[in-house]
Amino acid sequence: MQNEIQFLLNEDVVKINNIDPNTTVLKYLRDLKNLRGTKEGCASGDCGACTAVTVEIVKGRLVYRSINTCIMFLYSLHGKQLITVEHLKKNNKLHPVQRSMIDHNGSQCGFCTPGFIMSMFSMFKNREQTS
């Protein structure tokens, strides 16, 4: 295994040397980057509260994938972009997925809402690419 990984966290280049191979993306986001919109629910990849989105180039096009950050190891982000819920808002304007959730009362208690938003964002972006 290599000693360094490099990826984009939202729009920032991140380089990490000598990472603990057991560090999950969720632990990194919450504990080291203080990005707490990504939640821990079940810690087994079932509930989706921890969902974020990876982006990578596949066959010349960007592919967006929803990931369970609680079971994905940080080193697997090498060469990709990771998008978190905190990054969707641009110029003080909510992303259309966020706006739709608000406009249509698509949330219950709110704990899992960031995960729902990120899953829908991934689908939105992939559909946008094929239109």
Image (cartoon, rainbow, N blue to C red):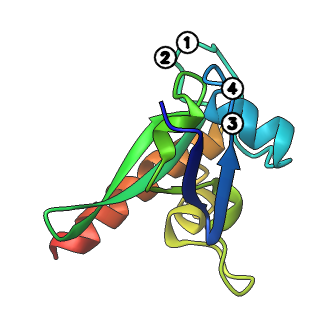
User: For residue 46, which numbered disc appears in the image?
Assistant: 2
Vertical arrangement, residue 117 with respect to residue 97, above or below: above
Residue 75 in picture, x, y percent from top left: 54, 36
Q: What distance separates the C-alpha of mark 1 from that of mark 2?
A: 6 Å
Q: Specify the label residue 18 is tagged with.
A: 3
Judge depth for marks 3 and 1 and give the one in front: 3
The residue labelled by disc 1 is 44
102 on left or right of 96: right
* Three-letter code for the amino acid on which mark 1 is drawn: Ser
Q: Which element is circle 1 on? A: loop
Q: Quadrant of residue 26?
A: top right
Mark 3 crowd level (few <14, some 14–19, many ≥20, 10 Å Cα): few
Q: Is residue 112 above or below residue 80?
A: above
Which mark lies nearer to you, 2 or 4?
Answer: 4
Mark 4 against mark 3, which lies toward the viewer?
3
Q: Position of residue 63 (x, y in %)?
A: 28, 59
The residue type indicated by label 3 comes to: Asn
